[in-house]
Image: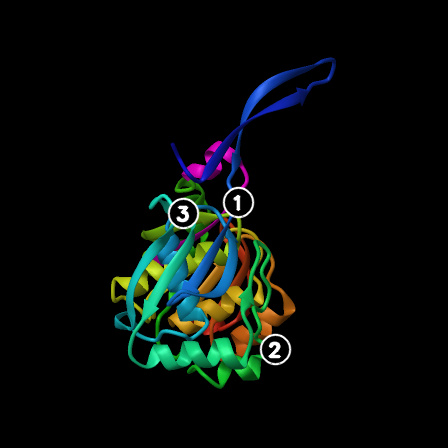
Amino acid sequence: MNPAVHYIDIVRVGPSARASAPDVVAAEEPLEIRLAGQPFVVIMRTPGADRDLATGFLLSEQIVREFGEVSRMRYCTDEDGRDTDNVLNVWLTGDAVARAQAAMAGRRHVTANSACGVCGRRSIDDLMAGIRRVDGAMTASREVIGMLPDALRAAQRTFDETGGLHAAGLFDRDGTLLRVAEDVGRHNAVDKVVGAEFASGRVPLSEHILFVSGRTSFEIIQKAVVAGVHVVAAVSAPSSLAIELAREANVTLLGFVRGRTFNIYSGAERVVP
């Protein structure tokens, strides 16, 4: 059974009658991430790729900076010795231990939801103080950019069943889809993609395009900057703070990508004919 969906009974109302019918909806469940047994964050997510989600979240929060700092992960067990799929324990090593302790003691426990905002970051200055601007000569052609919406949509298998999930796709400069993730939250989908690439030793993602369904908000640009992504594109609009951060971090930000038309909000020099 696909953990990303739930099967339910509904009443479907038509022009002249109504009738009971089965339906499929996107699953949304809490994932509690614990650091060495201590609660750290609760994320509302679509089950699946939880380890990638946790890794990507810890990277974007700058708790881990190298994958070797993630020692191990395992689901917690209940009194019967069975895994509890909604509680994931993460053990860190090296300097990440001190960063985690400082984050938990000096800042706050992070609580996110499917419409997560800044996640405790209060300003662009706070974010940019801990990471470098995205610099590089990577370019993307207008033709490739125009291909991205259809390519991502074709890979959204769970969306085909439910119509209720966002997606994030990682593409190379030629428009080849390298990795895709779906989730009820756009930021969760980005964390899953980035976390999987980070665990495979492929961060920074300086030669890649991140394409997301829906709008682009601050936290998506935040995660892209930490992962070293040069180009972020979306089918809908960016927020004002996303644009401000993209310009500050030198990320190329594209919105309303629909066929060969789109808007460039920052980094226009990376888009070539």
Examine the rendered structure and indicate whether residue 48 appears above or below residue 248. Answer: above
Q: Residue 7: give x, y in percent of width and height.
A: 50, 29
- Comparing marks 3 and 1, which lies closer to the viewer? 3
Sequence-wise, the earlier of marks 2 and 1 is: 1
Quarter-wise, where is residue 72 in the image?
Answer: bottom left
Q: Residue at x 42, y 83 (%)?
A: 132
Query: Given the current orientation, which residue lies at the most extreme front position?
Result: 79
In the image, what residue type sits under mark 1? Glu
Instruction: Identify the magenta region.
Output: 157-171
Please, what secondary structure does the residue beneath circle 1 have? loop
Q: Do the residues labelled 3 and 1 touch (CB within 8 Å)?
A: no
Q: Name the residue under label 1.
A: 28
Q: Are marks 2 and 1 in contact (CB under 8 Å)?
A: no
Q: Mark 3 points at which residue?
A: 85
Q: Residue at x 46, y 81 (%)?
A: 102
Res 122 label:
2
- Residue 144 horizontal side relative to residue 68, left or right: right
Q: Which of 121 and 176 is in front in this view?
A: 121
Quadrant for the N terminus in the image: top left
Q: Do the residues labelled 2 and 3 touch (CB within 8 Å)?
A: no
Asked if one can make out residue 12 in the rendered structure from this viewpoint, the answer is yes
Q: Which residue is drawn at 49% across and 86% down?
A: 129
Q: Residue 151: give x, y in percent of width and height.
A: 40, 45
Spatial distance from mark 3 to mark 1, Cα to Cα? 13 Å
Res 194 label:
none
How many numbered marks have been drawn onto this rendered protein structure? 3
- Residue 207 horizontal side relative to residue 211, left or right: left
- Comparing marks 2 and 3, which lies closer to the viewer? 3
Spatial distance from mark 2 to mark 1, Cα to Cα? 27 Å
Q: Which of 170 and 231 is in front in this view?
A: 170
